[in-house]
């Protein structure tokens, strides 16, 4: 095993369910919008000969590892470095006009959390970094040392569902400058009442997740990327999204519902008069979750939610009532 393979050891979540979903799609390129180490992509390429992969990721280390892993598939694989809302650029650069599907496996990869110098984890001491894209100027240090207490508390509450957001934010501001992850983890632990520290995993987990989401603007790019994916897929194509946080899942659910109803708000008991256009159908209304066995074997799968839509030819919602 090379150093790169080792660094990018990541267990793909719900890989067999996701593989099965892409069996019926038309032949062509499936966009893997979060290529990571290439685990899902490899499974799709092995299982379905009619599919090729356009893989994008904002993390160049991930792209390098995936390219190495997927080299045996030759020209069935193309990779491009961009945020996923840049998918039009990736498709144009690779001369791909329409997609047979798209997969978004949101959040961080195991190596981003596990490689100490990336500064994502409260378990490893490292400079406060947390950038998925190393060419980005803005890092965790800017958030931790630069945000006023109320803004920091909002981030912790919104992206970490942190009950003690205000206390933690005040403790962070009082302890500045904070340079390292271990220092931040210690400040968070001491800001949380002793009784609450004993439940719900490591006390710094929610704070680190919230700061990571803020640094990488993880929710900002998602609505535009999903709309673009729907726009560039061919009828019969499927779009699948794995999310790991309630804020992400809410965006996915709303974007898919909007595409399914065409944004129609006419009263359900009356015919639609707003000329709304439906572009997808929900493959299942409720999100799927990993099996108990997968959740037990892969702690990162525990919070996963899978939502799927199928692209249809644009059709007026009028006919559905
Ligand atoms: C959970 S991992 C994907 C793992 C992959 N499915 C596999 O099987 O190896 C998520 C990946 O998405 C990338 N990522 C997160 N947000 C992104 C965005 N807005 N644009 C592009 N890539 C993103 C991260 O850098 C990370 O490599």
Image (cartoon, rainbow, N blue to C red):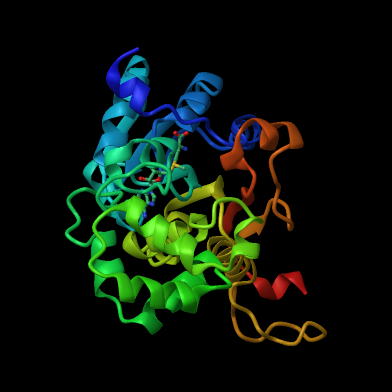
The quadrant where residue 312 appears: bottom right
Q: Is residue 152 visible?
A: yes
Q: Is residue 210 visible?
A: no
The quadrant where residue 262 appears: bottom right
Q: How many marks?
A: 0
Indicate the quadrant of ligand 1 in the picture.
top left
What residue appears at the point 52 percent right and 28 percent down from the top-left corner? 44
What residue appears at the point 57 percent right and 66 percent down from the top-left corner? 259
From the viewer's perspective, tell me whether residue 178 is left or right of residue 15.
Answer: left
Q: Residue furthest right?
A: 269
From the viewer's perspective, tell me whether residue 221 is left or right of residue 320.
Answer: left
Q: In this picture, is 73 found above or below 56?
A: above
Of 232 and 244, nearer the camera is 244
Residue 276, percent from left and from top: 59, 77
Q: In this picture, is 298 found above or below 206?
A: above
From the viewer's perspective, tell me whether residue 209 is left or right of residue 255.
Answer: left
Residue 48, percent from left and from top: 54, 24
What residue appears at the point 39 percent right and 38 percent down from the top-left corner? 35
Of 168 and 231, nearer the camera is 168
Residue 172, percent from left and from top: 36, 71
Q: In this picture, is 30 found above or below 248?
A: above
Q: Quadrant of the N terminus?
A: top left
What residue appears at the point 47 percent right and 64 percent down from the top-left corner? 190
Residue 32, percent from left and from top: 43, 40
């Amino acid at each position: 095993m090379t150093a790169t393979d080792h660094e990018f050891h990541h267990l793909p979540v719900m890989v067999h369910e996701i593989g099965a979903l892409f069996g019926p799609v038309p032949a062509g390129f499936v966009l893997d919008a979060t290529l990571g180490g290439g685990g899902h992509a490899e499974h799709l390429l092995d299982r379905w000969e009619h599919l090729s992969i356009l893989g994008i990721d904002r993390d160049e280390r991930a792209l390098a590892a995936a390219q190495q892993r997927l080299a045996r598939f030759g020209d069935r694989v193309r990779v491009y470095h961009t945020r996923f809302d840049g998918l039009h650029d990736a498709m144009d650069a690779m001369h791909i006009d329409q997609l047979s599907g798209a997969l978004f496996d949101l959040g961080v990869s195991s190596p981003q959390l596990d490689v100490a110098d990336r500064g994502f984890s409260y378990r490893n001491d490292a400079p406060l970094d947390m950038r998925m894209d190393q060419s980005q100027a803005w890092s965790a240090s800017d958030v931790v040392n630069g945000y006023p207490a109320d803004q920091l508390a909002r981030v912790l509450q919104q992206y970490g569902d942190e009950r003690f957001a205000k206390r933690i934010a005040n403790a962070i501001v009082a302890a500045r400058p904070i340079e390292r992850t271990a220092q931040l983890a210690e400040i968070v632990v001491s800001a949380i009442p002793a009784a609450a520290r004993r439940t719900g995993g490591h006390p710094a987990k929610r704070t680190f997740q919230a700061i990571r989401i803020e640094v990488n603007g993880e929710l900002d790019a998602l609505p535009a990327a999903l709309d673009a994916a729907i726009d560039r897929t061919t009828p019969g194509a499927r779009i699948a999204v794995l999310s790991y946080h309630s804020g992400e899942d809410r965006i996915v659910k709303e974007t898919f519902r909007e595409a399914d109803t065409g944004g129609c708000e006419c009263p359900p008991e009356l015919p639609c008069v707003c000329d709304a256009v439906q572009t997808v159908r929900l493959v299942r209304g409720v999100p799927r979750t990993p099996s108990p066995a997968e959740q037990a074997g892969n702690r990162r799968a525990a919070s996963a939610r899978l939502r799927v839509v199928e692209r249809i030819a644009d059709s007026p919602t009028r006919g559905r009532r």
